[in-house]
Amino acid sequence: MQPTSTSKLGFFFSDHHRWLLKHIHKRLRNRADAEDTAADTFCQLLAAQVDPDSIEQPRAYLSTIARRLMFDRHRRRQLELAYLERLSLLPEPLAPSPEEQLLLLEALVTIDRVLDGLPHVVKATFLYSQLDGLSYVAIAQKLGLSERTVSRYMKQALCQCYLSELTP
């Protein structure tokens, strides 16, 4: 009788979970984050519907997924810290409520994920325009670019946003 893909994943998980958790914990030095990242790693494996038998180097495969997740977690935290720093500069009557703050932070994380892979200057152009409300002229001056380049970068970022809506 052939094992089902679910039981194969169960064996794969039990064979590699402890090693992966130690591997991640060494890098993050935080047990809770290491556990979350290990769980997310196996969730990605499950979502990708990969046959565990087809993975020639399981530890390399899992550590690659985990490394990407750790990088995403770090980027998300940096984004959150920058957002909270900006909020702290606002006068209290203008500061958003905790619920609004959470929604705004989730939107920022989504934007960051959508723009992932674009060059830094393209992301900066988009964010200056959409979050800071700067004109193309002001962005061009701030980044040392021509207005035409700012326009081209905005088009590139907006295309990326549009395409991300088309793909799950």
Image (cartoon, rainbow, N blue to C red):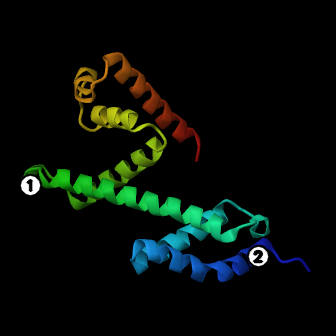
Task: Residue 18 in the image: state x and y as whole percent.
Answer: 58, 83
Q: Which residue is mark 1?
A: 92
Calculate the distance from the C-alpha at mark 1 to the C-alpha at mark 2: 55 Å
Element assignment for label 1: helix
| Residue 81: quadrant of the picture | bottom left
Report the residue at 49% width, 35% height from top. 160
Does residue 96 appear anywhere in the picture? Answer: no
Among the two numbered marks 1 and 2 on one chain, the one whose residue lies closer to the N terminus: 2
Residue underneath mark 2: 8
Which kind of residue does numbered mark 1 sit on?
A: Glu
Question: What residue lies at 45% left-to-right and 59% top-to-bottom?
Answer: 71
**Residue 5 drawn at (x, y percent):** 78, 71
- Disc 2 secondary structure class: helix
Q: Nearer the viewer, residue 122 or 56?
A: 56
Which quadrant would the N terminus be assigned to in this image?
A: bottom right
- In contact (CB < 8 Å): disc 1 and disc 2: no
Residue 2 visible in rendering: yes
